[in-house]
Amino acid sequence: MEEKKVFFNSGDMKIEGILTLTKNHSPAPAAVVCHPHPEYGGNMHNNVVTGITHTLSKQGFTTLRFNFRGVGYSEGSYGKGVEETKDVKGAIDFLLGAEHLEINGIFLVGYSFGAMVGLQVADKDDRIRGWAGISPPVAMYDFSFLKGSFKPKLLLFGDSDFACPKEGMEKLFESLEEPKSMSIIPGADHFFWGKERTVAEYVLNFLGTFFPK
């Protein structure tokens, strides 16, 4: 596993990211991983984000995690979850256009705010084969844009998650088309401290259905 700091374009701005490469699989499946809310300390070094990228990378996935605009060394400023969709598209463009990087399908994994932003792109962009929403904050944002989504999808949240009440998650899940799956992690809240490996294994198992060993 090799980690490389990279910068890619989002419009006329530079976005900071970390590309994790595997030496064992070429071409490799890839995952773009989006971090939680920047105004509450969210960045690409978040515990859930790094847990997912490291687990996927060890299993042969190329991963790209990045700082949304205005975070870390990414240029620009907070775009209220609207402008950040351009950063997600820029990440996809980068993966497909990077020299010497062979990609066999791209998936998107979004955590919290990163789910709200990333899934807007993932559901509409034909370059994304499927997506995983980790604790999409249904109590704070409207996720009706996913209604009728036909792409393979995973919803995952904790049973003590204040941002993802069970009733709201079940309502969202019911509005989605197959193929779909939803899992609840016992004893986990919105931050998943101590549960990072469990989250990562759920995501890995979901993506593993596309690339069976």
Image (cartoon, rainbow, N blue to C red):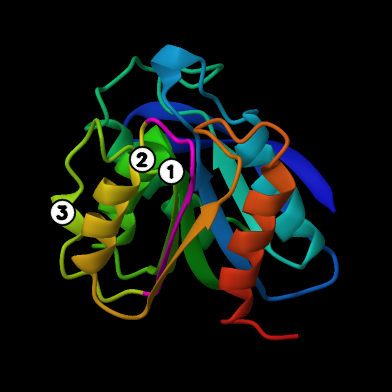
Q: Secondary structure at mark 3?
A: helix
Q: Which residue is mark 1?
A: 135
Give the left or right position of residue 91, taking residue 195 as reference: left
Query: Compared with residue 24, is residue 44 higher up or lower down, i.e. above or below?
Result: above
- Label 1: how many residues lie within 10 Å, few (<14), some (14-19) or many (20+)? many
SS for dot 1: loop
Range of the magenta residues? 152-162
Distance between the alpha carbons at the discs numbered 1 and 2: 6 Å
Please rate how many residues cluster around mark 2, counting C-alpha atoms within 10 Å: few if below 14, some from 14 to 19, many from 20.
many
Type of amino acid at the residue the image marks with label 3: Phe
The percent coordinates of residue 38 (x first, y second) are 43, 19
Residue under numbered circle 2: 164
Instruction: Quote the CA–CA distance across marks 3 and 1.
Output: 16 Å
Decide which of tag 3 and tag 2 comes sooner along the chain.
Answer: 3
Image depth: mark 3 or mark 2 in front:
2
The residue at the point 36 percent across, 43 percent down is 136
Q: Is residue 1 above or below residue 79?
A: below
Residue 155: percent from left, percent from top: 42, 58
For marks 1 and 2, the one nearer the N-term is: 1
Q: Which residue is mark 3?
A: 145
Q: Nearer the viewer, residue 26 or 212?
A: 212
Amino acid under disc 2: Cys
Say which residue appears at 58% left-offset and 71% top-offset.
Answer: 207
N-term-proximal mark, 3 vs 1: 1
Asked if marks 1 and 2 touch (Cβ < 8 Å), the reply is yes
Q: Give me the residue at 48% from left, 30% from top.
A: 15
* Residue 161 lies within the magenta run: yes
Image quarter (top left, top right, bottom left or bottom right) of the N terminus: bottom right
Q: Residues within 10 Å of mark 3 (few under 14, many from 20)?
A: few
SS assignment at label 2:
loop
